[in-house]
Image: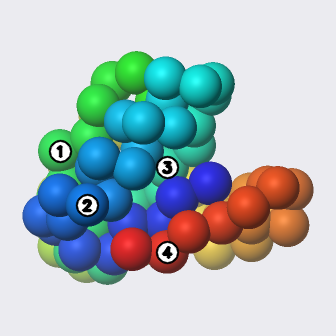
């Protein structure tokens, strides 16, 4: 599980792409990370409150903090970028 907080993080994108080659990857976009361009080959979720606060329409599934907490609890590892 990757949680992206910044819009442009080339290192995070590279790590996610490398992990994707090995298996499924989940990404949650929060804060300014909701503006990030993420590969469609990963499971992407966006914090609905952050998207609403920034007036952003997103193609990704909107989730709340409770669901994000469940993702974190269920993940074998979590990286925050």
Label 2 crowd bin: few (<14), some (14–19), many (20+), radius 10 Å:
few
Q: CA distance from mark 3 to mark 1?
A: 11 Å
- Callout 2 touching callout 1 (CB < 8 Å): no
Question: In this rendering, which labeled residue sits more in front, label 2 or label 1?
Answer: 2
Residue at 62% x, 54% y is 1
> Mark 1 sits on what residue?
37
* Residue 32 visible in the current orientation: yes
Q: Position of residue 36 (x, y in %)?
A: 19, 55
| Residue 75 x/y as whole percent | 79, 55
Residue occupied by mark 4: 80
In primary-sequence order, the first of circles 3 and 1 is 3
Q: Earlier in the sequence, mark 2 or mark 1?
A: 2
Q: Which mark is residue 60?
A: none
Q: Secondary structure at mark 1?
A: loop
Hey, which quadrant is residue 81 in on the image? Answer: bottom left
Judged by depth in the image, the label closer to the viewer, 3 or 2, is 2
* Side of 6 relative to 30 (left or right): left
Could you tell me how far apart the alpha carbons at marks 4 and 2 are, in whole angstroms? 12 Å
Tell which of 36 and 53 is nearer to you.
Answer: 36
Q: Is residue 25 left or right of residue 59?
A: right
On the image, the x and y values in percent for residue 16 come to: 42, 45
* Number of other residues with Cα within 10 Å of mark 3, as a class: few under 14, some 14 to 19, many 20 or more: many
Residue 15 in the figure: left or right of residue 54: right
Residue name at image x 23 percent, y 74 percent: 6
Is label 4 or label 1 in front? 4
Report the disc number at residue 27.
3
Which element type, helix, strand or loop, lies under badge 2?
helix
Above or below, 76 relative to 4: above
Tell me if label 3 and label 1 are in contact, CB under 8 Å: no
User: Disc 3 versus disc 2: distance between alpha carbons?
Assistant: 14 Å
Q: Report which quarter residue 35 is drawn in.
A: bottom left
- Mark 4 or mark 1: which comes first in sequence? 1
């Amino acid at each position: 599980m990757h949680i992206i907080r910044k819009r442009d993080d080339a290192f995070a994108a590279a790590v996610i792409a490398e992990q994707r080659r090995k298996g499924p990857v989940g990404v949650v976009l929060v804060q300014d990370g909701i503006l990030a361009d993420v590969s469609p080959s990963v499971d992407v979720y966006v914090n609905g409150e952050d998207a609403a606060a920034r007036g952003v329409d997103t193609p990704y599934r909107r989730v709340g903090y409770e669901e994000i907490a469940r993702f974190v609890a269920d993940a074998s590892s979590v990286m925050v970028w």
